[in-house]
Image: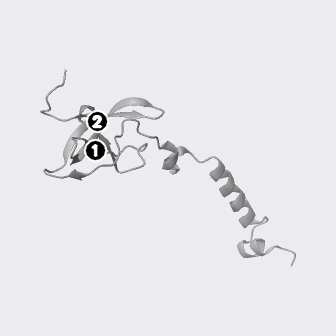
Amino acid sequence: MNCGRNEWLFGIGHNWAASVSASAHNGLMTEDYGTATWRYWQKIQNDTGVRSSFRTRPPVPVRTRIEWERDGTEWLEGTATRLGFDGSIFVELTDIRCSIIGVWLLPGDVWWPGKQSSI
């Protein structure tokens, strides 16, 4: 029999494995950003860095001012979970552009219901 192994196994007139491999390669070359989230990651410019902290109350929903490396400034929803000894606030973010769990921000970049306005 002159058929290749794949032709004989699947009873088709072409090499099935080769065509699947070629289509998989083409699919990988044109994949969208939804399948590789690291492509979205951006540095947060107003991150104050890691610091000593404590937790004295339960997590609080907040709005935060984030300065993205490429997208500029925007306000996002987050959850404040820790307070630094210097007053900085750790906010957990769920934005696809954030490659880490959260970010340390100055109190002026975080708003919550009942916060006194600094203006």
Identified at 52% across, 50% down, the residue is 36
The residue beneath circle 2 is 64
Q: Please tell me which residue is depicted at 28% across the width and 33% down the height of the picture.
A: 109
Q: Quadrant of residue 116?
A: top left
* Residue beneath the point at 66% across and 57% down: 24
Residues tagged 1 and 2 counted as in contact (Cβ below 8 A): yes
Q: Is residue 112 left or right of residue 73?
A: left
For marks 1 and 2, the one nearer the N-term is 2
Nearer to the camera, 15 or 59: 59
Where does residue 7 sit, x and y in percent of width and height?
77, 71
Q: CA distance from mark 1 to mark 2?
A: 8 Å
Kind of residue sitting beneath label 1: Val
User: Would you place residue 48 above or below residue 11 in this image?
Assistant: above
Q: Quadrant of the N terminus?
A: bottom right
Is residue 115 toward the left or the right of residue 80 in the image?
left
| Secondary structure at numbered mark 1 | strand
In the picture as drawn, the residue positioned furthest to the right comes out as 2
Q: Is residue 67 left or right of residue 53?
A: right
Q: Nearer the viewer, residue 100 or 8?
A: 100
Q: Where's residue 53, x and y in %? A: 23, 51
Q: Residue at x 50, y 49 (%)?
A: 38
Q: Amino acid at mark 2?
A: Thr
Residue annotated with mark 1: 91
